Amino acid sequence: MIELERHIEILLLSNDCVIVPDFGGFMAHHVDARYDGRDNMFLPPLRTIGFNPQLTMNDSLLALSYVEADRKSTRLN
């Protein structure tokens, strides 16, 4: 089974927030593309990741990810 951080990483690819119950939530923030006039460069859009320790309510997203990964590994064996 894959580790907790890998589950969080995969979930953040398609979700803006992943909550680890009784710990906190990881949040993805979208940053638009922009032009940097100082360096004469266009910068691509990106996502930054933040952490909020006040987001502790279980939304089951992480648990469902573990269940799905376990189900897939059981089918392979």
Image (cartoon, rainbow, N blue to C red):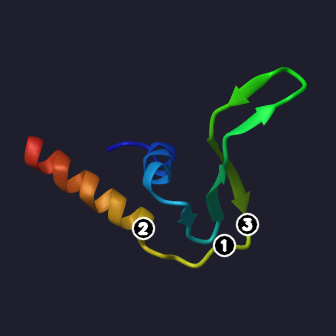
The image quarter containing residue 19 is bottom right
Q: Which image quarter is the C terminus in?
A: top left
For this rendering, which residue is in front, 12 or 30?
A: 30
Residue type (three-letter) at the residue carrying disc 1: Leu
Decide: few, some or many residues near mark 3? Use Cα within 10 Å; few <14, some 14-19, many ≥20: few
Q: Is residue 14 left or right of residue 50?
A: left
Q: Is residue 64 left or right of residue 59?
A: left
Residue denoted by label 2: 61
User: The residue tagged with tag 1: helix, strand or loop?
Assistant: loop
Residue denoted by label 1: 55
The image quarter containing residue 20 is bottom right
User: The residue tagged with tag 2: helix, strand or loop?
Assistant: helix
Does residue 15 lie above or below 1 as drawn?
below
Residue type (three-letter) at the residue carrying disc 2: Leu
Can residue 32 be seen in this snapshot?
yes
Q: Is residue 35 left or right of residue 4?
A: right
Mark 1 vs mark 3, CA separation in Å:
6 Å
Residue denoted by label 3: 53
Measuring from the top left, give residue 56's x and y in whole percent.
63, 74
Measuring from the top left, give residue 36's x and y in whole percent.
82, 30
For this rendering, which residue is in front, 75 or 9?
A: 9
